[in-house]
Image: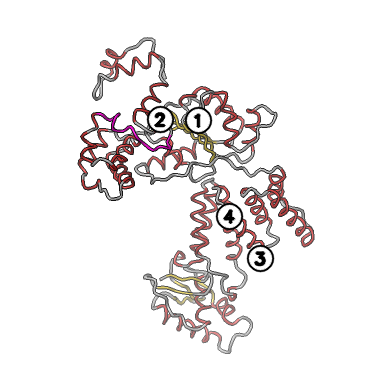
Amino acid sequence: MRFGFLGPVQAHQDDGTPVDLGGPKVRTLLALLAAEAGRIVPAEALLDGLYADTPPEGAANALQSQVSRLRRVLGPGLVEFHPTGYRLAVDPSTVDAHRFAALAADGRAALDRGEHLAAEENLTAALALWRGEPPAELGPSRWPELHLTAIEDHARAALALGRPGLVPALREHLGAHPLRERLWALLIRAQLADGRPAEALSAFEQARTRLAEELGADPSAELAEAHRLALRGDDRRVTPLPAQLTSFIGRADELTRVRALLREHRLVTLTGPGGAGKTRLAIEAAADTPACFLALAPLTEGADLPRALLAALGAREGARDPLDRLRAALADRPPLLVLDNCEHLIQPVAELTADLLRANPALRVLATSREGLGITGEARHPVPSLEPLAAAALFTDRARAADPGHDPAAHPDLVEGICQALDGLPLAIELAAARVRTLPVAQIAARLDDRFGLLARGERTAAARHRSLRGVVEWSWDLLDGPERVLAGRLTVFAGGATLPALTEVCAVPTCSAR
């Protein structure tokens, strides 16, 4: 059975059937017991809640009568008698208020850890349980303050995640709590995030005036900081993570691992060949925290890096040296920097990243690259090919999206063969799955001997290196120097694995640079 007193007192069977609780006294008694679910409530406290200052003659008998009525509607065993009072013998998690408190606490803890998506989910679930104020008979309680704090924490998480449209709800809450400084600070930040700095400054003046007139107090540090941001027009509009149009398949364990690495290390680099899914994994891993995304593939010169990062952070260059401006821009509430496709600018990216990490102890960086940045403290996570089951699931999902009338699951052996032939490489699998618009699965499998010709037409809006399998290989090939290309060519004689002596005999190139 489940119970609720955040709003009208209610009880439901496990299947959702409502329980008819009867009159107001029985409902009040249930609320008093549910507020202390699992613990003994003294008889005196129950009498005070039921009758206040006007207990009837024979108050103990009156209380026992109400307990008997409650037992009849709830069934046996739930309301226990003890020498000092009564106990609702249920787990606190069956009561909406206790579930609310637990979810709100989890949300705040996630917020403090910087896990904003998890915080938002917990706080959304908590606020959904709130149907209104608890019964007045409970007297002054912690629940209204917990509710207001959860509202503020939820707004803080939503702001960190770049959620729009927070201003109307915050204004509504301020109408009921006009002296709540944290609400004012959140309103100012929300107005800045919506690109309304003039309204943010006006809101601060309203808050300052009201606090001075009604409390004789100056703005708190949090409100003053929001004012400072409004004065400089800083809405922190960093370049967000790219929105994804497809489902994320097959890397749940890796996602957990990368998020754990981000909690433990300030620099995490996802490494692997082109098309392995490094970018997508990085985007998913960064989704629960404020992040700034910078795609490096369009850049051709390392000198462009500081200005490109300033633009991604939404910071103005000004007259100062771009690197100094970058350090200043990251000094206040630095986001997680996601640097995507670092391999063609590996040296300048490594130098800039090391400089910024040294300058700001709170900064964290998640990079994707064909090779690691080679910085002290870097945690590398190689992104492998997909396991067979995950690869088949990816092909099936993308093929159904390409042609909803097509069911590749009807040909599991063919799908498995295609994925195996493509080495479980996510981009190659997606390119193959897109061909179901024009070719049956059997034909796709049969034509993989000419995979560069078969997988030559990907998404038109994708970067050139992701539109075809040839583009993926060419991007990697162009990054190699002369000796490395010789080594890569010699490796092609091995159809499968090879021993170290065989590799040394066939592939040894004394002048090849080590990477």
The x, y position of residue 81, in whole percent, is: 46, 77
Going from the N terminus, do you reach mark 1 or mark 3 first?
A: 3
Q: What is the span of residues highlighted in magenta in the rendered image?
A: 450-462
User: Between residues 288 and 111, which one lies in front from this camera angle?
Assistant: 288
Look at the picture and state if 188 lies above or below 331. Answer: below
Mark 2: secondary structure: helix
Write the residue at 51% across / 87% down.
61
The x, y position of residue 109, in whole percent, is: 53, 51
Write the residue at 58% across / 76% down.
137
From the viewer's perspective, tell me whether residue 322 is left or right of residue 382.
right
**CA separation, marks 2 and 4?**
37 Å
The x, y position of residue 2, in whole percent, is: 43, 70
Specify whether residue 460 is painted magenta.
Answer: yes
Question: How many numbered dots are placed on residues in this image?
Answer: 4
**Mark carried by residue 465:** 2
Q: For mark 3, what is the residue? A: 176
